[in-house]
Amino acid sequence: MKAPNTLVKVYTAAILIMLPLIVAAFFTPPDFPMLPRQILLGVWGVGATLVAERWLFSRTWRQAGQAVGFVRTRLPAVAVALLVSLPMWLFLPLLAWLQATPIQLQPDWFALLLGVMLVNGLTEEVLHRGFVFGHLQQEHSFSRAATLSALLFAAQHLYLIFTIGWLAGLASVVLAALLTFPLAYSYARGGNSLSGPAILHTSSNAPMIILALPPSFGASVLVPYMGVVLVSIYLVFILDRSPARPTVKAMIR
């Protein structure tokens, strides 16, 4: 019997890992503390991805960790990620100031930020960039590998259509698909490291979560904020021109 190819193995494992994350995000009661919830999701997502990598592809646990992006990054990739993150962090405070709209940090902003870093910045990047894109780039061009991984990344966000409304939810799904390409680019240019995309992914989500926005203001700026995120994060294609190098997965085989 012919062994399943890489695409089948990666898609199957990723879907099995994603399903509990989606169910938890959809059905967790609103009053459940966010940080414990994010810790549980992070432990599951990172742990299950490492198990899948070790079982399907890598010979040792150390190699599994390296293969999903736990390696030293190139400093230029981190610098670029920090630079293009600035508009994402500045847009809401600046717009609120121009409109004389008072905003402040959420009372539990630090716990909220840690939660975003753990799930969006770490867990989703381990799964979608380190595991899914990381393996697909071994057999496909960058554009094809990123496109195939974008389908899964967008699918994971479909539940938002039912939780935040169809317009904002659909915009979030489209945004997730489009963000896959610069996030994958940052991952590859950083030496197949999670650092760059983790910074970018955290910056694209955290401001809307840790800032206490008046309801009318928050609703009116959601789509423009998504536009700022999209334009900002695509700057990595212009600013990061460091040469690619052999992937970790290629080097450990």
Image (spheres, rainbow, N blue to C red):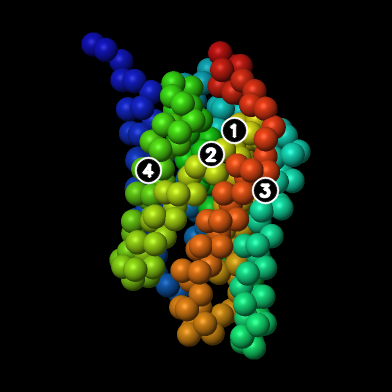
Q: CA distance from mark 2 to mark 3?
A: 12 Å
213 or 98, which lies in front?
98
Q: In the image, is 136 to the left or to the right of 211?
A: left
Numbered circle sitting on residue 184:
2
Query: Quick one: label 4, few (<14), some, or many (20+) residues within 10 Å?
Result: some
Q: Earlier in the sequence, mark 2 or mark 4?
A: 4
Q: Earlier in the sequence, mark 1 or mark 4?
A: 4
Query: Quick one: label 2, few (<14), some, or many (20+) residues within 10 Å?
Result: many
Q: In the structure shown, which secondary structural element does the residue marked by tag 2 occupy?
A: helix
Provide the residue designation for mark 3.
Answer: 81
Q: Is residue 13 visible?
A: no
Numbered circle sitting on residue 199:
none
Q: CA distance from mark 1 to mark 4?
A: 18 Å
What's the residue type where badge 4 is placed? Leu
**Which quadrant holds the C terminus?**
top right
Q: In the structure shown, which secondary structural element does the residue marked by tag 3 occupy?
A: helix
**Which quadrant holds the N terminus?**
top left
Q: Earlier in the sequence, mark 1 or mark 3?
A: 3
User: Vertically, is 226 above or below 100?
Assistant: above
Query: Quick one: label 1, few (<14), some, or many (20+) residues within 10 Å?
Result: many
Q: In the image, is 177 to the left or to the right of 218?
A: left
Provide the residue designation for mark 4.
Answer: 152
What's the residue type where badge 1 is placed? Ala
175 or 159, which lies in front?
175
Q: CA distance from mark 2 to mark 4?
A: 13 Å
Give the image location of residue 174, x and y in percent.
Answer: 39, 55
> Residue at the spot x=52%, y=82% of the render?
217
Q: In the structure shown, which secondary structural element does the residue marked by tag 1 occupy?
A: helix
153 or 108, which lies in front?
153
Provide the residue designation for mark 1.
Answer: 188
Please name which of the two marks, 3 or 4, marks the residue nearer to the observer.
3
